[in-house]
């Protein structure tokens, strides 16, 4: 017998981003994305002292189908690898022509995006910023402040995630701390295949 | 020459729901939905004293296309028509098989939903509630508290709005105040064509 679905609530803590129930929780430590940071000496140094938690995503479970809406909260912790701020891995959508919306609830970040045609763009993330990520743009969130960066995201049910392009080529830009302030600079390793 | 689109931010005031820029603002007074309330004597009485503002929606302008994401904030003001709480008109989506997400930021409400097969459901709305409206379910928001009910909504770009079914038939349930507390009761006028 088919079970009839019912509308449902999830409870989002607007202060710290935690969802209850927490759904599918994704936890990324530095070791899960160590090749993505520029300063590999800093990576090795940090990994010797432990394996810092970079970010957590709470995904509400929804069918991966057209017409549905995936939604999640992400918490990117404050910190740096060398002078590069903690960030998410970043990805295109598998169905690349799908948008995404980020509503930032806490902290301060930079949303770095890159179109399939190579154009890049950044948007400031701050409590109340509603960022519209266009279809066909990869996206990465970077915590540039002293507290956790917390945002609520919504994207089409069948969008999926394509991490491969970014894992292989990176983004053309990166966000570094200069005198503690974030600056967006060219990524010297862009499009160089990782060894 | 085609103008290349750029990702963009909108600024949402998390306290009162106002979006800047405000986009396409929809303003509904009692006169815009007077047939939807049960107590027509109360409607006439209120209209004599003015035309109360029931709710406002700020819609970010996004192409009405698959892969895009419509998003808006709604502010439903506190008040009653007789003993029936102020509410939105409610609608199905034109492409009925599309979901919607409501993140409540302020106030207290009841989200009333009705499937195409006639089933009804309600969810409590409160700060931090993330309500998942299933595809094929009509939805209406009812402010059952003393302050504005504010929520942020996201739905597929090509979902559209179908108000006609609800305008003609209403919802099978309604939310009334009994000793100031909200109760969900059958709508005695359900499916009776409005005169």
Image (cartoon, coloured by chain):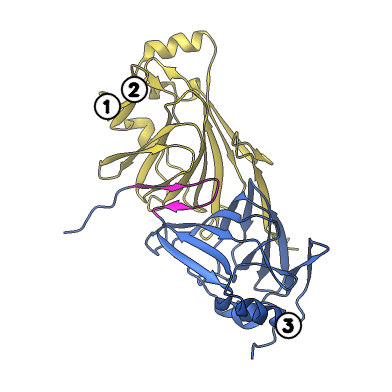
Chain colours: A yellow, B blue
- Rendered image: mark on residue B189: 3
Is disc 1 in the same subunit as disc 3?
A: no
Q: Which residue does the image show at 69% across and 56% down from the upper left? A: B146
Please determine whether, in this image, residue B184 is positioned above or below residue B16: below
Front-lying residue, A1 or A144:
A144
Is disc 2 in the same subunit as disc 1?
A: yes
Quick one: SS at disc 2?
A: strand
Q: Residue furthest left?
A: B1
Label 3: chain? B
The x and y percentages for residue A164 are 39, 36
Say whether residue A67 is left or right of residue A169. Answer: right
Is disc 3 in the same subunit as disc 2?
A: no
Front-lying residue, B183 or B91:
B183
Label 2: chain? A
Q: Quadrant of residue A35?
A: top left
- Rendered image: mark on residue A176: 2
The x and y percentages for residue B35 are 63, 81
Per the model, the C-alpha gap separating discs 3 and 2 is 63 Å
Quick one: SS at disc 3?
A: loop
Q: Mark 1 and mark 2 in contact (Cβ < 8 Å)?
A: yes
Asked whether residue B159 appears in the rendered view, the answer is: no
Q: Residues within 10 Å of mark 1 (few under 14, many from 20)?
A: few
Q: Point out the frontmost of discs 3 and 2.
A: 3
Q: Mark 3 and mark 1 in contact (Cβ < 8 Å)?
A: no
Q: Which residue is mark 1?
A: A185
Q: Residues within 10 Å of mark 2 (few under 14, many from 20)?
A: many
- The quadrant of the image that shows the N terminus of chain B is bottom left
Q: Quadrant of residue A192?
A: top left
């Amino acid at each position: 017998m088919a079970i009839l679905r019912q509308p449902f609530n999830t409870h989002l803590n607007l202060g710290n981003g935690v969802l209850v129930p927490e759904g599918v929780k994704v936890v990324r430590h530095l070791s899960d994305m160590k090749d993505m940071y520029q300063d590999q000496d800093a990576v090795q140094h940090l990994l010797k002292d432990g394996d810092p938690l970079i970010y957590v995503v709470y995904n509400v479970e929804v069918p991966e189908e057209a017409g549905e809406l995936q939604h999640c909260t992400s918490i990117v912790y404050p910190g740096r690898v060398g002078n590069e701020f903690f960030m998410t891995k970043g990805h295109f959508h598998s169905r690349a022509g799908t948008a995404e919306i980020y509503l930032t609830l806490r902290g301060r970040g930079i949303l770095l995006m890159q179109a399939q045609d190579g154009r890049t763009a950044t948007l400031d993330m701050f409590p109340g910023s509603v960022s519209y990520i266009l279809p066909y743009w990869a996206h990465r969130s970077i915590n540039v402040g002293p507290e956790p960066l917390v945002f609520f995201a919504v994207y089409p049910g069948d969008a999926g995630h394509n991490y491969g392009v970014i894992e292989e080529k990176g983004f053309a830009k990166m966000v570094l701390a200069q005198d503690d302030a974030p600056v967006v600079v060219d990524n010297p390793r862009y499009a160089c295949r990782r060894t």
